[in-house]
Image (tube, rainbow, N blue to C red):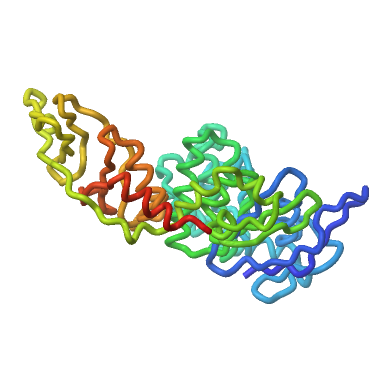
């Protein structure tokens, strides 16, 4: 648990970086700091590992004032991931990741063994362990940065815009990976971003900061989207906050409908053809009962569009079991109805657009 108690920071030139910040990042959760440039996000995060010393107030880590003790000892017990990964260019990947275990007293052999385990955990091929950082892609470098932070087995991770320097596709992959790791490890994570979509996707709780280091609102994502406290927060989270909030509204009352289905003949034999049912859109299923395509009334194959995942066994499955997932499936389908699948991707039924819209009306805040 990380507690900020009236933490303030005024720099030598008189600039106010933080103003009486009080909030708690709870144990085992991802707490996200978000806001415009100059709002004190990074300053707040760096007071935790004493890379920035506050001029007032105090930061407590598991009930202990971080200012009372050796900063080097403090930092060895906290994982730290920054933008551009910050890898040592003169050390191979395996030795970059083994840095903290060596500093904590493990032999080089033990530290490298630990590093190899963590590299596998973050989804990196073991063959990359002997490469230099310059030989890696941006996304691979960021994964190594996360691995290095995990290698010391610290209960707390500080992550300062770790995914902002990679392209959008890789960024989503890294976010997925972080959610998967967090589901397994349950770390206390303080995460800084300027991207409200990233904050809402990753955070158990989100702190919105104003310019000048003042806390505007601190709440779970659903509450932040449903009830911003003022015009600043409302403007920052965006005009489409109502739609994004649907990703937190469960679709438990949504009843699936029966759709015509048949085996996907084209999936079994390239020479065979599927036969259309006159006037009907039909879901083609592969041999594992997973939807493969739509078959239109004219016999043409069409892409499925989004599918509605009815349950979220996968931590990275955004909007699983929510109205947002149901609405995406219904609106993206060429058939006017969406396809619903379970967590393993097996067909479970159809999503009727009118039924989803009726639930939206009932779930909208008054």
Residue 348: x and y, percent? 21, 51
In this view of the protein, can residue 339 be seen by the observer?
yes
Residue 94: x and y, percent? 51, 47
Residue 31 lies left or right of residue 176; in this view the side is right
Examine the image and state in which quarter residue 87 appears.
Answer: top right
User: What residue is at 21 percent from the left and 41 percent from the top?
Assistant: 291
Residue at the right extreme of this rendering: 13
Residue 63: x and y, percent? 68, 76
Disc tally is: 0
Residue 118 lies left or right of residue 20; in this view the side is left
In this view of the protein, can residue 189 be seen by the observer?
no
User: What residue is at 39 percent from the left and 52 percent from the top?
Assistant: 323
- Which image quarter holds the N terminus? bottom right
Residue at the bottom extreme of this rendering: 63
Residue 279: x and y, percent? 14, 31
Residue 240 lies left or right of residue 256; in this view the side is right
- Along the viewing direction, whichever of 276 and 266 lies nearer the viewer: 276
- Along the viewing direction, whichever of 252 and 104 lies nearer the viewer: 252
- Along the viewing direction, whichever of 93 and 239 lies nearer the viewer: 239
User: What residue is at 87 percent from the left and 55 percent from the top?
Assistant: 10
User: What residue is at 20 percent from the left and 48 percent from the top?
Assistant: 347
């Amino acid at each position: 648990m990380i507690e900020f108690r009236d933490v303030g920071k005024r720099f030598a030139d008189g600039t106010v970086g933080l103003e009486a910040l009080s909030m708690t990042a709870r144990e085992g959760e991802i707490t996200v700091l978000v806001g415009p440039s100059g709002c004190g996000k990074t300053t707040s995060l760096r007071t935790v590992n004493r890379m920035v010393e506050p001029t007032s107030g105090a930061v407590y880590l598991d009930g202990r004032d971080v200012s009372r003790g050796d900063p080097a000892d403090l930092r060895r017990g906290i994982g730290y991931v920054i933008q551009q990964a910050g890898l040592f260019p003169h050390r191979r990947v395996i030795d970059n990741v083994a840095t903290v275990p060596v500093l904590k007293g493990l032999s080089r052999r033990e530290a490298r063994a630990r590093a190899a385990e963590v590299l596998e955990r973050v989804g990196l091929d073991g063959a990359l362990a002997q490469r230099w950082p310059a030989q890696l892609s941006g996304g691979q470098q960021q994964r190594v940065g996360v691995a290095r932070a995990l290698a010391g087995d610290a209960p707390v991770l500080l992550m300062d815009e770790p995914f902002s320097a990679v392209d959008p596709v890789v960024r989503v992959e890294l976010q997925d990976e972080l959610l998967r790791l967090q589901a397994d490890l349950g770390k206390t994570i303080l995460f800084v971003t300027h991207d409200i979509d990233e904050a809402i996707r990753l955070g158990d709780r989100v702190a919105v900061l104003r310019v000048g280091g003042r806390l505007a609102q601190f709440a779970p994502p659903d509450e932040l989207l449903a009830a911003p406290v003022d015009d600043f927060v409302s403007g920052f989270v965006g005009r489409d906050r109502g739609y994004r909030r649907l990703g937190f509204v469960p679709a438990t009352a949504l009843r699936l409908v029966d759709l015509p289905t048949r085996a996907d003949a084209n999936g079994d034999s390239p020479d065979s053809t599927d036969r259309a049912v006159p006037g009907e859109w039909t879901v083609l299923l592969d041999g594992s009962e997973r939807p493969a395509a739509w078959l239109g009334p004219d016999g043409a194959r069409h892409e499925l569009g989004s599918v509605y995942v009815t349950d979220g066994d996968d931590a990275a499955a955004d909007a699983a079991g929510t109205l947002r997932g149901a609405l995406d499936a219904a609106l993206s389908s060429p058939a006017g109805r969406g396809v619903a699948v379970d967590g393993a991707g097996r067909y479970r039924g159809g999503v009727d657009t009118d039924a989803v819209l009726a639930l939206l009306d009932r779930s909208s805040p008054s």
